[in-house]
Amino acid sequence: MYVYSHFGVGLPHNAAAQQSGTQAVPAGQEQPGDLVFFGNPAYHVGIYVGGGSMVNAPHTGAMVSYGSVAGASGSAGPDLTAAGFAGHRRHPAFRHSSLAAAPPTPSLSRKGKHLRPPAD
């Protein structure tokens, strides 16, 4: 919600409502900025950042984490593994080109908490 609001796109607070208000993305057509859902109805959502990775927070106010979509931390819900993965979805109002226009930052920030993706 926080990241999307930065780009002028509103999302409901509930993961299941976000899932129902977005469009499915076929496998292989994922783009950074797409939402990544777990469960159907969804109990958790992250933001795809490319290369099979996503960012997510296990709960409101928690530190944002960076990791694999297929092996995300299980602390955010009952199953954030490939078994719980419900697919990528895209909000119709979100423009992926706006990510390219965003100013570069050395870290991701949410409510004063910073995260750097792991070094390759």
Image: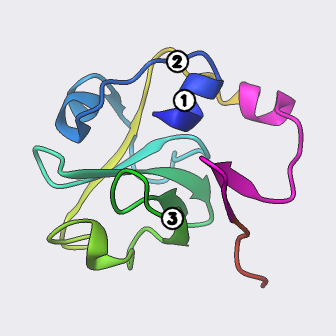
- Which quadrant of the rendered structure holds the C terminus? bottom right
Q: Nearer the viewer, mark 3 or mark 1?
A: 3
Give the labeled residue for mark 1.
4
Alpha carbon separation for disc pair 3 and 2:
22 Å
Please indicate whether residue 66 sits to the left or right of residue 1 in the image. Answer: right
* Residue 62, horizontal then vertical, whole percent: 43, 61
Q: Earlier in the sequence, mark 3 or mark 1?
A: 1
What is the CA distance from the residue labelled 3 to the residue labelled 1? 18 Å
Residue denoted by label 2 = 9
Q: Which residue is mark 3?
A: 63
Q: Residue 94 in the image: state x and y as whole percent.
A: 55, 22
Q: Is residue 91 left or right of residue 99?
A: left
SS at mark 1 in the image: helix
Q: Which residues are magenta?
A: 98-114
Residue at 82%, 35% in the rendered image: 100
Instruction: Classify 36 as above or below 81.
Output: above
Q: Position of residue 97 (x, y in %)?
A: 74, 27
Q: Are marks 3 and 2 in contact (CB under 8 Å)?
A: no
